[in-house]
Amino acid sequence: MAKAKYSYNEKRKEWIALVYDGTLTSTGQKHRKKITSKKSSADLEKKVNAFKQSITEDNTQKLTITFGEYSRRWLEVSKATKELNTRKMYQYTLSHFVSINHKMISDITHSDFQQIINEQIDHPRTCRTIKLTFSQIIKSAVRDHYLPRTAVNDLLTDISLPKYQKPLKRALSESEKHAMASADLDSRKRAFISILYYCGLRRGEALALTPDDFNWDDMTVSISKVIIYDSNQPLLKAYPKSDNGIRVIPLPDASVRHIRPFVESCTDSFLFHADNNEMMTAIGYRRMWESIICSMNIALGYDPQQKNPKPVKPIQKLTAHTFRHNYCTELCYQIPTISTKEIARLLGDNEKMVIDVYSHLVEGKENTSEALNNVFGS
């Protein structure tokens, strides 16, 4: 007797079929969808055929989607909850894939990917970002069943990247510290640079400060928000970069004379704001920062009016983040009086970052030969 095409469950009074849906399980087996009918095997047959037709149409659609179409959809869906600057980074990175945007995603090859890397070979950091983005897109396409599981290995394995050396962060030089102390700055600029120096804040955290964030009884400043920029437009985020960013920082005694008078005299919403008492724009911030650096250079003998020969500026490439790294560096010199965990809390960062900085400082002071002689004797 021929075996029935579909099974029948007496208890549930229904016909049952297990139909391959075109995907694989985590173990590589065919994944099957359960389809049932309480009417008849003929009704179940109709449902099975309709399901198979939908799979065919879906697969046809997936075979005709281009890499450009899928990558744009991936950015809109997968990165919708990411920070603005992160989304911008991915959006910029996608511009490097223009040469393959027209190709069907199923036709992308290992050589296509390597060629994109080769075109940016003089920019090692960009190459790393391209690889990160491309890898995420391909893995997403596999999960969405636009590509087989083998695509991850076929497309991403053995990609040759140019050597990348992460630039070392630096602390302030002694001349920069001298320039900061002796520069002719108004009360607002003096307060801003002092907050960076004595509190180690990120630029956006400092720009988001209000007079209410300071507690002069406890001598602390509270960090709970940040300003980010969409091109020139400032946007206030009601939370810092991460959960660790919400913190209370003690104000060193030396900072008070530079910060307190300005804070107590401020009657505006933000300490550092535009002329209309709104948040400072990106252009407004750049002008303020360039003015601060110019004053510091003048304090070191630079004459901006000198034309011939044009003098070299003593201070160059100094950013707000340099002050933050200087804060971390100075605290690391105080270990074990202060722990790496507490330094991380003050910075609103993770302990691994602090340990990396501390390890670098220790390595710079190591004397291996002396240590070996101390252990093993002469």
Image (spheres, helix red, strand yellow):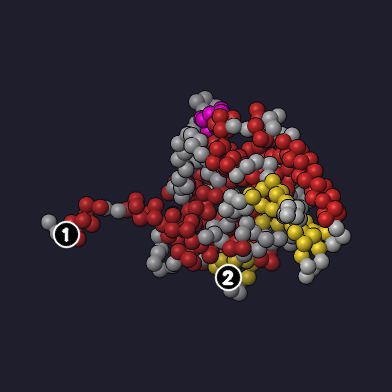
Q: Secondary structure at mark 2?
A: loop
Q: Position of residue 38 (x, y in %)?
A: 84, 62
Q: Residue at x 58, y 70 (%)?
A: 219
Q: Residues within 10 Å of mark 1 (few under 14, many from 20)?
A: few
36 vs 294, left or right, is right
**Mark 1 falls on what kind of element?**
helix
Q: Say what amino acid the circle numbered 1 marks.
A: Phe
Report the residue at 62% width, 57% height from top: 241
Specify whether 10 is left or right of 317: right
User: Does residue 223 show up magenta in the picture?
Assistant: no
Farthest residue to the front: give it. 1
Residue under the point 41% across and 57% down: 358
Q: Which residues lie in the magenta part?
A: 115-123
According to the picture, the residue beneath numbered tag 1 turns out to be 376
Query: Which quarter of the rendering shows the C terminus?
Result: bottom left
Indicate the amino acid at tag 2.
Met
Task: Tell me where residue 363 appears, x and y as whole percent.
Answer: 34, 52
Observer-nearest of 137 and 141: 141
Does 116 lie within the magenta span? yes
Marks 2/1 in contact by CB < 8 Å: the verdict is no
Q: Which mark is residue 219?
A: 2
Image quarter of the N terminus = bottom right
Judge by depth and name the residue closer to the eye, 120 or 169.
Answer: 120
- Of marks 2 and 1, which one's residue comes earlier in the chain? 2
Q: CA distance from mark 2 to mark 1?
A: 50 Å
Left or right of 218 on screen, residue 171: left
Q: Which mark is residue 126?
A: none
User: Which residue is nearer to you in this view: 359 or 11?
Assistant: 11
